[in-house]
Amino acid sequence: MSQNGITKIKRSRCAIYTRKSSEEGLEMEFNSLDAQREACEAYITSQKAEGWALIRERYDDGGFSGGTLERPALKQLIQDVEAGLIDVIVVYKIDRLSRSLMDFARLVEVLDRNNVTFVSVTQSFNTTTSMGRLTLNILLSFAQFEREVIGERIRDKFAASRKRGMWMGGYVPMGYDVKDRKLVINEAEAGTVRMIYERFVELGSASVLARALQEEGVKNKHGNRIDKGFIYKLINNRVYIGEAVHKGTGYPGEHEAIIGQGLWDKVHAVLQTSPRERGAKTRNKSEALLKGLIFTRDGAAMSPTFARKGERLYHYYVSQDLIKNRTVSQDAGPARLPAGMVEAAVINQIRQLIKGPDIVAHVLATLGHEDVKADEKGVITSLSRFDELWPSLLPAEQRRIIHLLVERITVRPEGLQVDLNKIGLMSMVNDLANSVSKEAAA
């Protein structure tokens, strides 16, 4: 419009957006935020006759990639566009705003919705014209193509480095530290790794091994409990046999192996067996059934241990006096007992004790005192269930029941003394009675 022959020019509020990613080198022309801004300010000044004026707010993203919209200054710019505070956005080059065609299309929608013009000072066009939109899409397509080519080069370089056995960063496996961008053995952790491999071959079960390691207080590299998932990852990690793996293929690594090929092959021979078969084998192995319950007559704890002869393992309970070379009195009882023999003897004693008249009378008296309806025949039936139940239990459940029933086992020269836990016995009888009732109802 004109007034008194003078044409009134509409004022356009201009915002400059600059971006520099951390990957860009200093040798590139206009690579700094200040250089970009200088060029944009000069362009806005050249358009002063058209009513262009620079606003005071700065929108600078230093060290951010153009492949994402998650940039603080860009977010603030969009907020100000939505608030109606900007008429024109000026950038040095289109890829300063975005390198992704899809992301830029979203930005253009925001600009169109708010009647904001987009201008590149080195690529003469704006988004208000159809030719400007066409040119914009072509340029962005090339920018995205360049980005994808750079990504392919990085991936190819990574693959080539892995094939040469180089450590390319990431999660540092237990047993190693990183020094000068190379894996070096951490001897303390490496000992734990070897122990886990050896015990997995012995036990054949990650679940059983995980429970044992948790009871023993063994931790992973970060001080956390070791679970079954951690064990499976550890025994399948080929870095431990000195390999660098890329997309499933192993290459000789620059680092030193912790595990020998022979032990690795034994572990993976076990893994080739189905979980059901491994579970059946584990069921037949001693799991330190009496750990924490068995003592010599002098009060020394008898700890589970094993010895290997050829391919066979022999399990024992050994007095701490013997382990620590303390004096063992002659009348304290045996200081070393075969685990299978002593566990079978304890189980047999428990079977006899819980069916004895004294225990039956005690259970009846306690159940009667607690106003639980019970008769002698029902109690005897429930207690007899122990015999048929025991062989079907997994080792962990057998151990739980033994620790529920037994208060202490004392090794004497004349034999074993098994002291039952009456409270635990009552709990087991109730469980068995409920099981009998449910089966009768069914």
Image (tube, grey):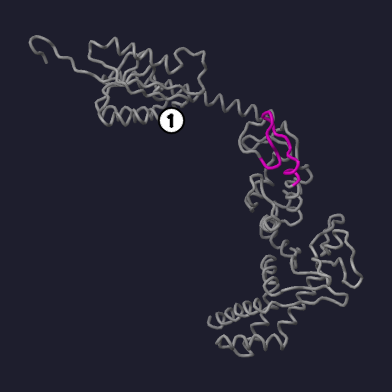
Q: Secondary structure at mark 1?
A: loop
| Residue that carries the numbered disc 1 in the rendered image | 68
401 sits to left or right of 117:
right
Start-end of magenta stretch = 173-191
Q: Is residue 378 above or below residue 394?
A: below
Residue 341 forms part of the magenta stretch: no
Residue 312: percent from the left, percent from the top? 83, 58
Task: Determine the image quadrant of residue 113.
Answer: top left
Q: Residue at x 66, y 31 (%)?
A: 167
Q: Is residue 82 above or below residue 229?
A: above
Residue 174 forms part of the magenta stretch: yes
Out of 316 and 274, give the one closest to the viewer. 316
Residue 55: percent from the left, percent from the top? 29, 20
User: What amino acid does circle 1 point to?
Assistant: Thr
Task: Determine the image quadrant of residue 296.
Answer: bottom right
Q: Residue at x 75, y 73 (%)?
A: 408
Q: Residue at x 63, y 45 (%)?
A: 222
Task: Determine the image quadrant of residue 346.
Answer: bottom right
Residue 351: percent from the left, percent from the top? 73, 79
Q: Is residue 27 above or below residue 403?
A: above
Count the numbered circles shown: 1
Residue 272: percent from the left, percent from the top? 70, 51
Out of 299 and 35, give the one closest to the viewer. 299
261 sits to left or right of 334:
left
